[in-house]
Image (spheres, grey):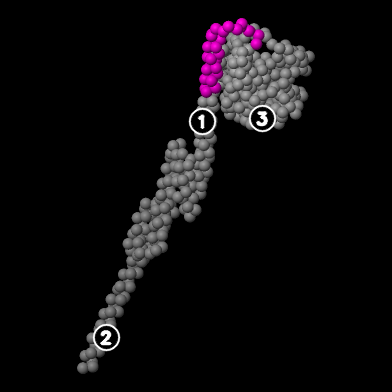
Amino acid sequence: MKKRGILPIFIALIVVGVIGVGGGSYAGAQYYQSDKYQKQADNLLSNGQYDEALVLYQKSLSKWNRDETRAKQDFARQEKEAAKLIAGIKENSNQVDGQSCLDRLKSITPSSRQYSEAEILARNCQAKLEEDQKKEAQVAKQAEEEAAKKAEEARLAEEAKKKQTTASTPTTSAPTTSTPSTNQSTAQESATPATPTESAPVASTTQTTDPNACTSNPNPVFTHHLTDTSKIVDIAIPPRIIGGHLKTHSYVETNFQRVPLYAPADMQLYGGVHLSHGSDPDDYGFDSKVSCEVMVRLGHITDPIQSIKDTFPTATTDSRTNYNITPINFKAGELLGYTTGTAAAGNWDFGLYNSSTKNRYADDPEWDDSSIYTTAVCPYDYFSTELKSAYSAKYIQDFGVSVLDGAFFCQQ
């Protein structure tokens, strides 16, 4: 009896052992296959073959479910999305706005292999955002300036209409031609701001039939700024030689900004030019008398007020046909217009000529044939003490390809 009981137990132990060995072999094979797929997927991931890597990671998980494999599978998905995002931004760089680009790139974390490329793109997007914001601000400012300009022109037109109505109404008092009426005085006072601003009034454009009319004053004082001095980058002071030509006016550098221009003193615009050349379709230059002795010249003015535009003929390449115009009177501080300077350099000209003085070129036979050469002086010396420092602080001597010609007219 004992012998028959021992034999079945022995046989059973042998069978269990065989089954155990067979099961262990199967499990080992599954793990081996899983590890093989994972390593292949790792190589594909490092080469940027994300779809192929994801397929093999899934095969690896089907053989052996490991947390390590699942983490790598998630990383492969993230890398695939990061690559797709970067490629989309590069392909549509002109259409994607800066802020949207920055927001989308935030999803790429430092752990990504593409983080360095994302950082470079982010810097480009930031620069684009700042440029877009700058353009928007410029457009908004220009629209504001245009609105203020139109509003002021409308106001002055309405005042002129009221004056005309008042003048046409008969009165019992004797007419007086030597003294301006109360309404006229008020209009002139309201058209002269205490300090120039972007919304300074447009000139009343009083016209005169005598282009030679003037008041003698060899030393007038400029009581108003010529422009918004905060926008002046620098001022190249005269005199200098450029391309073999003597330049006795200053160059005001405003770096292509649209800046206002004002009458620095009471003056009469009596001549000028309107040209169209190269990349400058509208290039105005005009001369104005401050007194019988003193003349101010402005050059490369791109957008004068409408009354000035109306007095010039159509643009031409021959400046001689444009010079003689109907004179226009301006009060100190009145708006003359706006300019962005030349299309090539972004600066404009400001010169002053005083017939009561003679500079060193008056005795130079090479240059003594023009009053523009012989009577030129430093225009900034005519501003009041309070105003002059805003200009003298911006003086520079070196200016492009120009050659300095002796001592400067302007001293700080």
Residue 250 lies in quadrant: top right
Range drawn in magenta: 150-179
**How far is mark 1 from mark 3, CA to CA?**
24 Å
- Sequence order check, earlier mark of 2 and 1: 2
- Sequence order check, earlier mark of 1 and 3: 1
Residue under numbered circle 3: 234
**How far is mark 2 from mark 1, CA to CA?**
98 Å
Residue under numbered circle 2: 10
Direction from residue 123 to residue 271 in the image, left or right: right
* Observer-nearest of 354 and 58: 354
- Sequence order check, earlier mark of 3 and 2: 2
Does residue 299 show up?
no
| Location of the N terminus (image quadrant) | bottom left
**Where's residue 363, x and y in %?**
78, 14
User: Label 3's element?
Assistant: strand
At a point 28% along the width and 83% down the height, the residue shown is 13
Q: Nearer the viewer, mark 3 or mark 2?
A: 3
**How far is mark 3 from mark 2, CA to CA?**
107 Å
Q: Nearer the viewer, mark 1 or mark 3?
A: 1
Residue under numbered circle 1: 139
